[in-house]
Amino acid sequence: MTNSAQWPGTTLPHRLFACLLALPQRYCEAIADYDQRNPSTPFVAQAGLTYDIRRLILPPNAASNMTIQDVIHVLIDNRISPSWIDHGYTYGLNYLNYNFDNSTYRELFDTIDNERITRVRAYGIPPAIAEWDGWRPLSCVEVARLHTILDGEK
């Protein structure tokens, strides 16, 4: 979502993204709100073999004022599928668990975790994308492709 080397404070967008991932149905609710506000241009997730995803670009002083809603706006603007966000639930939960005790953001994480528990009770644990489950090392071709993409962003 952001370029960490670009400016300090980019951990906040990443932290907020992880918090969003831990909140089942929050992104779907935001999409429903978007559709209600934009009936002539409803949300349609990107589909296909190639995806166009643009980074969030903010001046350094704006990062400290970000909210989860800002992260949601970027995801909606990029037409990210709700299933992708659902798939990230485990990451969001693990992020909260790993960072909760020794964090200056404990109050934020506590609020998010309380909302997470309420949402899990209401909606259940979001499903993962079966084809994406598991881990495998990148091939040499994939590593080269990533280098090409990152070099092109400089």
Image: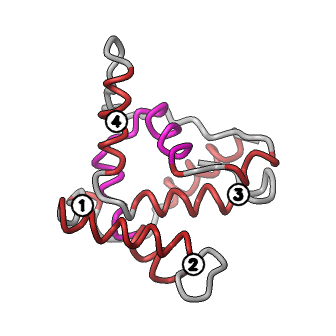
x and y percent of residue 42 in the render? 32, 21
Dot 2, how many residues are within 10 Å of its Cα: few (below 14), some (14-19), or many (20+)? some
Q: Earlier in the sequence, mark 3 or mark 4?
A: 3
Q: Is residue 154 left or right of residue 84?
A: right
At label 4, which amino acid type do we have?
Ile
The majority secondary structure of the magenta stretch comes to helix
Distance from disc 1 to disc 3, alpha carbons, whole Å, reads 27 Å
Q: Are marks 3 and 4 in contact (CB under 8 Å)?
A: no
Give the number of the mark in front: 2 or 4.
2
Q: Which residue is mark 1?
A: 128
The mark found on residue 101 in the picture is none
Q: Quadrant of residue 49?
A: top left
Query: Most extreme residue toward the top, as rendered?
Result: 40
Q: Which residue is mark 4?
A: 31
Depth check, front residue: 27 or 133: 27
At label 1, which amino acid type do we have?
Ala
Distance from disc 3 to disc 4, alpha carbons, whole Å, reads 25 Å
Dot 3, how many residues are within 10 Å of its Cα: few (below 14), some (14-19), or many (20+)? some
Depth check, front residue: 114 or 28: 114
The span picked out in magenta is 69-91
Q: Which residue is mark 3?
A: 10
Q: Which residue is mark 2?
A: 106
